[in-house]
Amino acid sequence: MIITKNISKTFGQGTRAVRAVKDVNIRIEEGERVYIHGPSGAGKSTLLHMLGGLNLPTAGTVTFRGKDVYYLRDRGKSRLRNRHFGFIFQSYHLLPELNVLENVMLPAMIKGGESAAGIRSRAAGLLETVGMDGRLKHRPGQLSGGEAQRTAIARALVNSPDILFCDEPAGSLDSEMREGIYLLIRDISEKNGMSVVVVSHQAPDRGFFHSEYAMKDGVLGRMTNDTSEGSRETKAQMAKGFRMTDDRVQTAEEIQYLKG
Ligand code: ADP
């Protein structure tokens, strides 16, 4: 679904240059759930933004279903993001002048092709699933951090994305709510074949992800293929075989380095 070839990102120039991401090769399959961890400043968010078409790599390519994400013109890129990608970020980016329900409806209204009533009922259903049904008319400024995060999660799912990019998706939630959100994401992923990339300090339940990567100093390494606690679907998908683009196996020293 998504394949990167040697993507790198450098911020700044000369002696101030920061190489945030270095030559990353990753392949994310349809329906695959990927977990990426690593210390703060390792380059995880930068990588996620590059995968999601939000931040042009300094070098290398990102393709989605065979199309170069950054070769698309602005409108094509926006359409790709609106129709195929979902984003859950640490900062929720909710529009302050819209209420909770309207915020969740917005991406579907932009996409078009559906009645406002249909969108409204789908958005309300998603908000109920994330436990926000009592807050539909609230403005973002009237919400707690956890409520804003749950609203952002519903909004990310409203257009049934093919791939969901999550940066600390449950950072503001207590452990029970966090588990609920991961279960919801996993459920949708299994039903619709949605791929998921999670960047987080807090590991999701092992059954959640098919593949785990660690990042350090801009370098990404694959940690494990172990799906022993994963679902049957997970195992069936793994049987089809997820492979890294470069098929490189991490050495024990490299894994130790990545673990920190
Ligand atoms: P992580 O998500 O793993 O905490 P980031 O991807 O946010 O790491 O950051 C990786 C490195 O890139 C850090 O050293 C950070 O300071 C730097 N960085 C990130 N974004 C910018 C930017 N817009 N301008 C300059 N440096 C940046």
Image: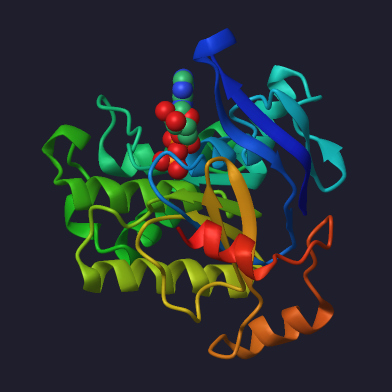
Point out residue 217 in the picture as x, y percentages from the top left corner: 53, 41
The answer to whether residue 116 is seen in the rendering is no
At x 32%, y 34%, the residue is 94
- Residue 176 picture quarter: bottom left
At x 80%, y 67%, the residue is 243
Q: Is residue 127 left or right of residue 70?
A: left
Is residue 78 positioned above or below 165 on the image?
Answer: above
At x 87%, y 44%, the residue is 66
Point out residue 56 in the picture as x, y percentages from the top left corner: 66, 24
Ligand 1 is in which quadrant of the figure? Answer: top left
Point out residue 212 in the picture as x, y percentages from the top left corner: 57, 67
Is residue 222 positioned above or below 74 on the image?
Answer: below
Point out residue 207 in the picture as x, y percentages from the top left corner: 50, 81
Q: Is residue 66 left or right of residue 252?
A: right
The one of 134 and 254 positioned closer to us in this rendering: 254
At x 25%, y 68%, the residue is 177
Q: Is residue 81 left or right of residue 155?
A: right
Is residue 144 positioned above or below 67 on the image?
Answer: below
